[in-house]
Image (spheres, rainbow, N blue to C red):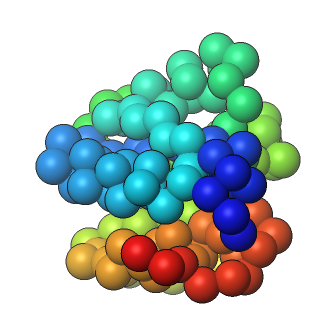
Amino acid sequence: MAFAEAASHTILVVEDDYFIATDIATYLAESGFEVLIANSADGAIERIMSGHIIHLVFSDIQMPGSMDGIGLAKWMREHRPDIKLILTSGVINAANELRALCDDGPIAKPYIRSFVAERIRHHLGDDSPTHL
């Protein structure tokens, strides 16, 4: 996927840890994606409902607020099933439920950034490897 093609795809990173969110968002931007960040599921829903065109949500599972990543996934499947979803967590204990809610199951933390970018490209229809 050329950078111009990737830039036509917007990724919403949902992560309450500022440093993790900034790290993966920077990497994805350097990989050519447009990146938005929300620090909670509530913030993610606000971004989604605000009219931003979002192609994929990359969300942590464990987050503070009225809803965690699983709740966000359920909300997305009901209200915005057109948006691809990848979940990530340092603790994955409900694998079967998570597989039903996110495309290809969750990604365990700590994750390799290039793997995340490749998974995103796969879900957006291009399986070419990341070159960063």
Q: Tell me if residue 117 comes above or below residue 25 in the rendering.
A: below
Above/below status of 75 relative to 124: above
Image quarter in which the C terminus is found:
bottom left
Across and down, in percent, residue 47 comes to: 56, 24
**Residue 122 appears anywhere in the view:** yes
As displayed, is residue 88 above or below residue 22? below
- Specify the quadrant of the image occupied by residue 1: bottom right
* Residue 60 seen in render: no
Name the spot of residue 63 as percent of width and height, x first: 30, 46
44 or 94, nearer to the observer: 44
Q: Which residue is painted at 26% across and 46% down in the image? A: 22
Image spot of residue 86 (x, y percent): 57, 64
Q: What is the total number of numbered labels drawn onto the structure image? A: 0
Looking at the rendering, which quadrant does residue 109 occupy?
Answer: bottom left
| 10 lies left or right of 90 | right
Q: Residue at x 42, y 55 (%)?
A: 30
Image vertical order of residue 55 relative to residue 65, above or below: below
> Is residue 90 left or right of 42 when viewed as pictured?
left
Residue 35 % position (x, y): 49, 41
